[in-house]
Amino acid sequence: MHLNRLLENPKVTVLSDVEVAKGKRRAELHVSGILCETVCVTRPTVALRKLPEVTSVSFDSDREAFVIDYESASSLTSRFERAILGAVIARAARAWLEAIARALKIRR
């Protein structure tokens, strides 16, 4: 568990989004601010799997990135980003803590 990351509002960065076969894509999205590899990974994984285009989801803990296989002719990474951030626990509180830490110049 990385409690120091409580002062960081989670952010999603697209690492890649490529076509792997006709109509099939793979996206890798890095998520900063993940506290643990239980609930903090499970909730976004479940949210992503609920999207009808998604065929598989995994989490690479070394890179702190979700790997998402999906069926679409075009990129859906903005939709994945919304699903991930929507599943983050206490996102508003963490944004508030990040702002306070920045104002007080607390290092993470």
Image (cartoon, rainbow, N blue to C red):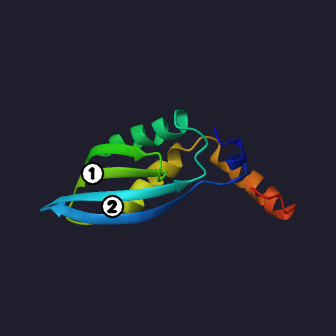
Along the viewing direction, whichever of 96 and 57 lies nearer the viewer = 57
**Residue 38 numbered mark, or none:** none
Q: Residue furthest top?
A: 38
Is label 2 in a helix, a strand or a loop? loop
Image position of 99 (left or right of 48): right
Task: Residue 84 in the image: state x and y as whole percent.
Answer: 47, 49
Image position of 19 (left or right of 103): left
Callout 1 crowding tier (Cα within 10 Å): few <14, some 14–19, many ≥20: many
Task: Residue 59 in the image: state x and y as whole percent.
Answer: 41, 45
Which amino acid, mark 2?
Leu
Is label 1 in a helix, a strand or a loop? strand
Callout 2 crowding tier (Cα within 10 Å): few <14, some 14–19, many ≥20: some
Quadrant including the C terminus: bottom right
- Residue that carries the numbered disc 1 in the rendered image: 69
- Residue that carries the numbered disc 2 in the rendered image: 76
Task: Residue 46 in the image: state x and y as whole percent.
Answer: 40, 37
Quadrant including the N terminus: top right
